[in-house]
Amino acid sequence: MTQQSDDRDAGTIERYREASRREGAAPSASTRAAILAEGRRMAARNSGAPISHRFGTMRPAANRSRWKLIAGGSVAFAGLAALLVLPRVFEPSRPSLAGSSPPPREVVAATAPSARPTEPEVPLAAERAPLPAPQRFASSLAQSATAQRQIVAAASRASDAASDAASDAASNAASPAAGAAAGKRGSSLQSDTSLWSAVSAGDSRRTAALLDQGADSRQSDALGRTPLLLAVMQRRADLVRLLLAHGADPNARDQAGETPLERARHDGRADIVAMLQAAGAH
Amino acid sequence: MVRFGRGDGAAFETLYRRHEARVFRFLLRTLRDEAGANDVMQDVWFAVARGADRYAPTAKFTTWLFTIAHHRMVDAIRARRPTETMDGSAESGDAPVLDLPPADARTEPLAALQREDRAAAILRAVEQLPAEQRCAFLLQAEGEMSVEEIAAATGTSFETVKSRLRYARTKLREWLTEYA
């Protein structure tokens, strides 16, 4: 009796669900747009990144992460330069060797340790008359010029690396060669998660570089979304074309059962629909 | 939801598209007003987007979502006309917001059933259920919530919810049997 009642109840609920689904009631387009916009806004806020960085609907007016890194690098460089120069100004016993002296000991040690034994002997400070302070300063500047050039190069490299890793926009601005180099720098950038991340950021250069390096375009995230589905969700025809050209599965479904083709149709993107169908989507 | 909380906007869109229809149907059938359902729909999802940091991954997402939807729906009814229930009757004293509907000859379920096809008939029949029973039924049918979860979401006892669901399903069965 109870079993029969439960069955009838389940039947009633199922009939309601079927009828309800068939009716196809849906919120208005403006409601949906407002909700999704709010979701994007809050996602950007949750990630702590500027809105434009997260969703590529517009280019950033200024790459804040980049200028902060450059400014930080400049300050660090100035500090290093000051550490190298100031002791020479205020240390009277240091020899004045403009034009003939070897590079500073630290740099030599770092760059060409084997050359050190063959370098000429540095005359003792006591054998030379000390120069006046202004001349010592000028001499010290000239002496450390080589070191400074090397520091500048190192700081520039470090700044570029930090900028590329810190911001998608920074990698957009970099050259394709730099993008490829960035891909080689960290092993994480060669992973499939990185491909997903590049597509998520709408970064076509990084996506292309990773695909060229052999990243698997068929891998999906925890929600079952492939990079291709994500590209369709972002309405990025260029990324869709790129991923399909590298063998992305046009019929892969996410956990909600949605395919890229269904999403493109839902969004009314005829160009993406055509691309997917040409690639075998059904 | 966890991914969205970490800043993944696409995860929110996936989540929204997955649950959009069910939440909207719940609101539409409880409020019986499309414009109002759209307003509350927006309100609900804004609350979801803004409350991602409060979501505990141990809780079932649909339970959390439909609890918010129920609360916002009740808020909307209260805000609409503080002295009226969602069924249009005058609210007296501390009567519940979701009160029983007055009998209306024009919307008699059987009459509706006789005019409409079978699929539409069950929808109309649900809309004719007393508000509290309708709400509990919809939370179960659309939100896939258990009796315990409905009781927690609506702030009523387990037995009360069980009773409302039993009456609702019995009534629907009777109407549909008569229609068939």
Image (cartoon, coloured by chain):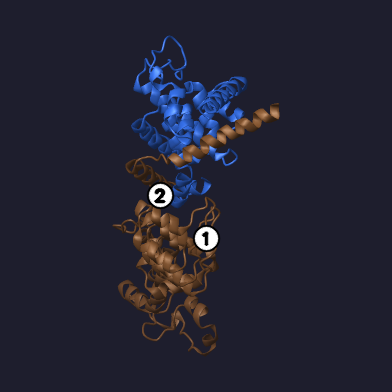
Residue B86's image quarter?
top left
Residue B6, above or below B71? below
* Separation (CA) of disc 2 from disc 1: 27 Å
Residue B165, above or below A80? above
Label ID, residue A252:
1
Give the x, y percent position of residue B136.
53, 26
Give the x, y percent position of residue A182.
46, 70
Dot 2 falls on a residue whose secondary structure is helix
The residue nearer to you, when weighing A1 against B82, is: A1
Badge 2 density bin: few <14, some 14–19, many ≥20, Cα 10 Å: many
Looking at this view, name the residue that lies furthest to the left: A61
Give the x, y percent position of residue A154.
43, 72
Q: Is residue B145 visible?
A: no
Residue A164, above or below B120? below
Tag 2 residue: A44
Q: Marks 2 and 1: CB-CB under 8 Å?
A: no
Q: Which chain is blue?
A: B
The residue nearer to you, when weighing A122 against B109, is: B109
Badge 1 density bin: few <14, some 14–19, many ≥20, Cα 10 Å: many
> Do marks 2 and 1 both belong to one polypeptide chain?
yes
The residue shown at (50%, 34%) is: B66
Residue A2's image quarter?
top right
- Colour seen for chain A: brown
Number of marks in picture: 2
Circle 2 chain: A
Circle 1 chain: A
The three-letter amino acid code for the residue at tag 2 is Ala
Dot 1 falls on a residue whose secondary structure is loop
The residue nearer to you, when weighing B130 against A227, is: B130
* For discs 2 and 1, the disc positioned in front in the rendered view: 1
The three-letter amino acid code for the residue at tag 1 is Ala
Residue A120, above or below B88? below
